Image (spheres, grey):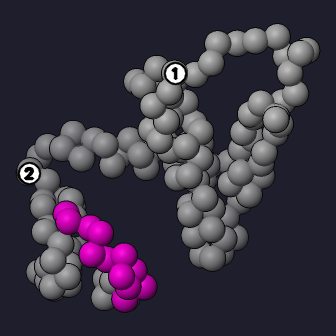
Amino acid sequence: MRNLMIDLGDHANQFRFLIRDRDAKYTTAFDTVFQAEGVEVLRTPPQAPRANAFAERWVRTVRRECLDRILIYNTRYLLAVLGEYPAHYNGHRPHQGRGQRPPDRDTVPVPATNLDALRVQRRKVVHGLINEYEQAA
């Protein structure tokens, strides 16, 4: 964890909380590294499988939409893919709970129009795994 905190550098101060389960592999030394950086360590309640539901949902979504569909051949490539996917998830991917709006957009999507009159532009993201479509200028 010290290596992670060193790699994060100045970005480490952006984290206020670390939510983790009660697994025995997380020792007090693990918690101390984060507490030294001012990050409060919160443990999930015992025998509460839904306590970390948001994180588990995010992991399931990343696996289903991204990692299960692409061959990851080394750590560098994995980090590149995982670095690009959140931009798609938050900026373009429709979310049913938000009325088909991504988290970074508050505007309501435009209604469907006749595509014969418009030009549509395709952009490949996440190393060609996902195609995003937008109206061309």
Under mark 1, the amino acid is: Val
Q: Can residue 63 be seen in the rendering of this structure?
A: no
Q: Position of residue 89 (x, y in %)?
A: 53, 44
Please rate how many residues cluster around mark 1, counting C-alpha atoms within 10 Å: few if below 14, some from 14 to 19, many from 20: few
State the SS at label 1. Answer: loop
Image disc number at residue 46: 2
Give the labeled residue for mark 1: 108
Q: Nearer the viewer, residue 87 or 5?
A: 87
Stretch in magenta: 6-17
Determine the CA span between mark 2 and mark 1: 41 Å
Q: Nearer the viewer, residue 29 or 9?
A: 9
Q: Residue at x 60, y 75 (%)?
A: 75
Splitting the image into 4 quarters, where does residue 127 fall? bottom right
Q: Residue at x 68, y 48 (%)?
A: 69
Please rate how many residues cluster around mark 2, counting C-alpha atoms within 10 Å: few if below 14, some from 14 to 19, many from 20: few
Q: Residue at x 57, y 36 (%)?
A: 93
Q: Position of residue 34 (x, y in %)?
A: 20, 78
Q: Position of residue 88 (x, y in %)?
A: 59, 47
